[in-house]
Image (spheres, rainbow, N blue to C red):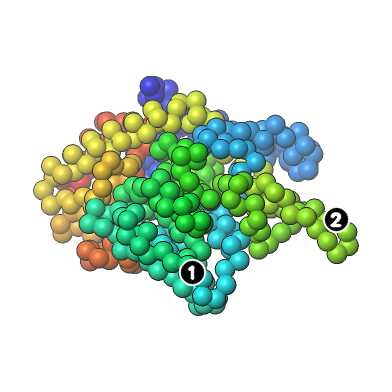
Amino acid sequence: MIDLETVRAETPGCEKIIHFNNAGCALSPNLVTDSVISHLQLEQRIGGYEAASQAEKQVANFYTQLAQMLNCESSEIAFMESATRAWQSALLSLDLKAGDEIITAGNEYVGNYLSLLSLTRHRSIELRTLALEADGRIKAEKLEKQLSKKTRAILVTHIASQRGDIQDIKAIGEIAQAEGICLLVDACQSVGQLPLDLQEIKCDFLCATGRKYLRGPRGTGFLFARGQSTASFIPRVLDLQSASWDTAESFTVKKSASRFESFERNLAGQIGLGLAVEYANSLGIIHIAARIQSLAERLVAGLQSIQGVRIHELSEPRSGIVTFSKTGAKAAALQSHLYQRGINTSISKRKNAMLDLDREMRDDVIRASLHYYNSGSEIERFMQVIDRF
């Protein structure tokens, strides 16, 4: 079980604010921030390269801890400066040609979808976007019927940024594997929140950011690249971290996921993210998931008791993301009202989710995203402010 008093004491931000914006950027525990500052100070004292040499074990801890969390090999993990960079690097490594087909769904993250639209314009890639079902999920059977000989990749966002419905990536992975089609999963909102076993989830790539439910530093992320299925996929951009220069005119690309990394990267951030993952592993991802779900259910029940409030999640079980609107209240005004009272939330913008929110809403919605360090009393305070607005 999670000791709430301890984890809140180790999270200084909990003293002054109610932080319900964990799907944007969670509050880091002390040891994460301290490790980043410590390494930056070491670089300042002795030099960046020399500090890197001294910190080899701390840097390696990132790979070990993340492999433990995801049940994969350390060699299948690449440190990336963002999930967007990881997602783009994985997709472009497929070396897509004109006429190749990509399938995604209506809950796709706006940044990813913009990249897909660019591919269709510049490379004549065919993009097929599945509509979500009434429960906000992708129906695996319908996805299977959409596959063709031209389908090169299936792209799935596990939990959408704009709405917290959870997709069945295990069922989708089984379909992709059976058809020999690459599956790329955006797990930005699920890594650190839900148990993910990559021996059971048959995806080829999976990416996430460090700043959300992992509670790591900003400017950090990772890419999982399955060794057995992606070894032949070469990143579009290489450097001395990705490959070896054998002769004046030849080179060899690394077989491990490190071929997606850059030599020049934020080592302080990587150390911090490694410790953030270690912190989560010490608490137990099963305990983390259970507490987040319990808090989300409590929040939803409270909001549903308030007149004029509508919850927009459609599926069960719930994630820690709860989006809602209140009759007569603009999302921006309500968010500002909450912020002035020491409560952090965010807004899911309709224009950034045109294939999802745009189906049924005419305005932006409030997104409250919970983490295990949030408390019941914070939820009660939150509901009081919403009720009185």
Horizontal and vertical percent position of residue 370 = 34, 40
Number of other residues with Cα within 10 Å of mark 1, as a class: few under 14, some 14 to 19, many 20 or more: few
Q: Is residue 253 left or right of residue 147?
A: right
* Whether residue 382 is visible: no
Q: Residue at x 67, y 40 (%)?
A: 40
Horizontal and vertical percent position of residue 28 = 49, 37
Quarter of the picture holding the N terminus:
top left
Residue 150, disc: 1
Number of other residues with Cα within 10 Å of mark 2, as a class: few under 14, some 14 to 19, many 20 or more: few
In the image, which is nearer the foreground, mark 1 or mark 2?
1
The amino acid beneath tag 2 is: Asp
Q: Secondary structure at mark 1?
A: loop
Q: Residue at x 25, y 65 (%)?
A: 359
Horizontal and vertical percent position of residue 209 = 51, 48
Q: Nearer the viewer, residue 32 or 64?
A: 64
Q: Nearer the viewer, residue 245 or 37?
A: 245
Q: Nearer the viewer, residue 199 or 269?
A: 199
Residue 203 against residue 94 in the figure, above or below? above
Horizontal and vertical percent position of residue 285 = 43, 31
Residue 106 against residue 322 in the figure, above or below? below
Q: CA distance from mark 1 to mark 2?
A: 36 Å
Residue 339 against residue 91 in the figure, above or below? above
Q: Is residue 216 left or right of residue 231?
A: left
Residue 334, disc: none
